[in-house]
Image (cartoon, helix red, strand yellow):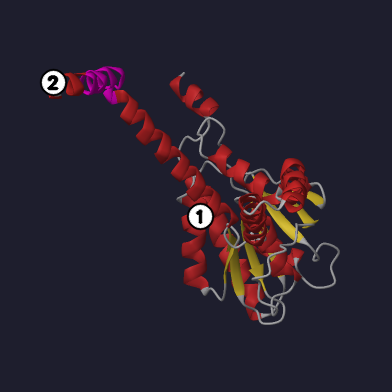
């Protein structure tokens, strides 16, 4: 009797073993790893933004929907069903800045879509020296300044809001642009493709609630453009003369000359690969 009762179970286990292959386990592991990585990257992107509070609100709605079904609250569950059904469009509208930032991060992960804003390393170093020299001069005299350096994400939409320049980058020119009561001193100067592309440009203001109240419009604009692009923005405070850098939504404040130069070299020079463009790589092959 034991033999006949055990045989069907043993047969079923053998049959199951034949249908399960080792690569099925590998697929499951890869699947879990990819999903975990995506969730982790999404958490990194929304960290420190208004999306955190919105995610908490969505979590409350989902928990309420589950509890209403569990306790049989039909009217509440019906209302929550309508919110969830039509909430996708609302989420796209509300999370538009975060979605844009996430897609830009995704695009920057591929070398086929990346590009080098300034290919010559010597030219990059020269630009960094010009930025540091002008920042120190303006800091000592408390001349407010706002300079945004383009990296991989294009800044053309912000360049179009200002006055075109298309000139070489020198510390003397940067200082003159921000002298008070001159036509171009108000707004941001944008560095694009190794040149001063435009002055008096408008940048998006950050809506983060974590920004210190003592920071003015310049700092909020610097953080704002760094939240939606991968640009590096140099800020000189008109009130205190303090020098700051905004990178990836974070503001590095009160930088001295050496710290400023080191941070700019890390973000502008070292971050730029030798051949980032697929077309450049093809040209090198030829």
Left or right? Give the position of 102 relative to 267: right
Q: Earlier in the sequence, mark 1 or mark 2?
A: 2
10 Å neighbourhood of mark 1: few (<14), some, or many (≥20)?
some
Q: Residue at x 67, y 55 (%)?
A: 61
> Camera-side residue: 213 or 12?
12
Question: As drawn, is 17 to the left or to the right of 223?
Answer: left
Disc 1, SS: helix
Q: CA distance from mark 1 to mark 2?
A: 72 Å
Specify the label residue 90 is tagged with: none
Which residue was labeled with disc 2?
A: 3
- Above/below status of 253 relative to 94: below
Position in image of residue 157 (x %, y %): 77, 45
Residues packed near mark 2 inside 10 Å, few (<14), some (14 to 19) or many (20 plus): few
Q: Name above or below for residue 272 compared with residue 221.
A: above
Residue at mark 1: 267
Identify which residue is drawn at 53% across, 50% down: 124
Q: Quadrant of residue 46?
A: bottom right
- Per the image, is 123 magenta? no
Whether residue 267 is visible to the viewer of this picture, yes or no, is yes
Question: Does residue 5 lie above or below 262 as drawn?
Answer: above
- In the image, the segment drawn in magenta is 8-22
Q: Position of residue 113 (x, y in %)?
A: 57, 32
Front-most of 183 and 240?
240
State whether residue 169 appears in this view.
no
Asked which secondary structure carries label 2, the reply is helix
**Looking at the rendering, which quadrant does residue 179 occupy?**
bottom right
């Amino acid at each position: 009797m034991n033999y006949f009762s055990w045989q069907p179970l043993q047969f079923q286990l053998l049959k199951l073993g034949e249908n399960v292959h080792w690569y099925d386990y590998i697929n499951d592991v890869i699947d879990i790893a990819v999903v975990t990585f995506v969730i982790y990257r999404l958490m990194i992107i929304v960290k420190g933004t208004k999306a955190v509070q919105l995610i908490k609100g969505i979590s409350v709605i989902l928990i309420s929907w589950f509890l209403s079904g569990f306790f049989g609250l039909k009217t509440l569950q019906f209302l929550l069903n309508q919110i969830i059904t039509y909430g996708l469009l609302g989420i796209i509208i509300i999370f538009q800045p975060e979605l844009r930032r996430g897609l830009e991060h995704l695009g920057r992960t591929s070398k086929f879509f990346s590009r080098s804003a300034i290919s010559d390393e010597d030219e990059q170093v020269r630009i960094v020296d010009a930025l540091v020299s002008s920042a120190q001069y303006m800091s000592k005299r408390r001349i407010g300044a706002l300079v945004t350096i383009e990296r991989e994400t294009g800044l053309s939409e912000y360049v179009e809001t200002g006055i075109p320049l298309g000139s070489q980058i020198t510390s003397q020119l940067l200082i003159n642009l921000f002298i008070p009561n001159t036509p171009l001193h108000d707004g941001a100067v944008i560095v694009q493709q190794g040149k001063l592309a435009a002055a008096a440009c408008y940048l998006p203001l950050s809506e983060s609630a974590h920004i210190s109240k003592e920071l003015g419009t310049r700092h909020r604009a610097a953080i704002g453009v760094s939240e939606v692009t991968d640009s590096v923005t140099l800020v000189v405070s008109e009130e205190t003369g303090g020098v700051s850098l905004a990178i990836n939504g974070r503001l590095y404040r009160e930088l001295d000359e050496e710290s400023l130069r080191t941070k700019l070299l890390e973000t502008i020079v070292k971050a730029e690969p030798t051949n980032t463009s697929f077309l450049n790589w093809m040209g090198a092959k030829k």
